[in-house]
Amino acid sequence: MLYRVKAWLAHGCLSKPINQRLLGEVVEQGSAGAIVGITPVAQPALFNRGELMNRLGGDVDLLADVVRIFLDDCPKRLMAIKNAVDLKDAELIRTTAHALKGAAGTMSAAAVFDAAQALERLGTEGRLEPAEAAWRILATEASNLMDIFRQMDAARTARTSCAR
């Protein structure tokens, strides 16, 4: 440990005076594989369940229905957006992204909403260069959301079939 401290001092990585207790903790954490000084950032929820349930009046059966509808509809909307991007059709990008943005807003899915809104804006502005990258972000966010919704649907189906 002493050779590390001397090397850090020599290269200006540590400032004086040294707090030995803190240095010891840092070295111990660092050797244990922890990243010191970096707090992991929590990933935002893929959708706001409380907000969605409030919008649906607390009706869990209605929640199950809208989740299934979204799961059926979203892949079709994504294909339409991808087609618009491939065609480099700004107006079609705008309208198809707008439609998915509305569905995501209804589902309280902020990440998909934001990604669709970014693509919609690109279409509105006729900026096609970044559209492919924006499409990939949207597709990833939508895929993650659909995975969560599929898990919810499967869990509900399992609970329902066990109750029979």
Image: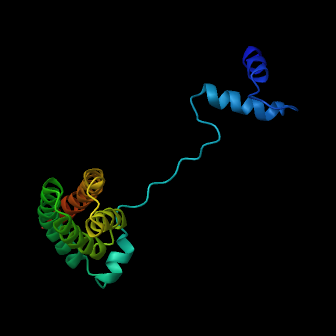
Q: Is residue 45 left or right of residue 59?
A: right
The relative height of residue 118 versus residue 22 in the rendered view (above or below) is below
Dividing the picture into quadrants, the one containing residue 84 is bottom left
The relative height of residue 23 versus residue 132 in the rendered view (above or below) is above
Q: In this view, does 134 lie to the left or right of 90?
A: right
Pick the residue in front: 37 or 10.
10
Q: Identify the residue shown where x is 25% and y is 75%.
A: 102
The relative height of residue 26 versus residue 107 in the rendered view (above or below) is above
The percent position of residue 111, horizontal first and vertical second, equals 35, 62
Number of numbered callouts drawn: 0
Could you tell me if residue 14 is visible in this image?
Answer: yes
Pick the residue in front: 164 or 19.
19
The percent position of residue 80, horizontal first and vertical second, equals 12, 62
Query: Quick one: quadrant of the C terminus?
Result: bottom left
Q: Identify the residue shown where x is 56% and y is 29%.
A: 33
The residue furthest right is: 17
Dividing the picture into quadrants, the one containing residue 64 is bottom left
Q: In this view, does 7 lie to the left or right of 161?
A: right
Query: Quick one: quadrant of the N terminus?
Result: top right
The residue furthest top is: 3
Q: In this view, does 151 lie to the left or right of 113?
A: left
The relative height of residue 35 versus residue 46 in the rendered view (above or below) is above
Pick the residue in front: 131 or 164.
131
The percent position of residue 140, horizontal first and vertical second, equals 28, 52
Q: Identify the residue shown where x is 40% and y is 61%.
A: 45
The percent position of residue 60, horizontal first and vertical second, equals 25, 76
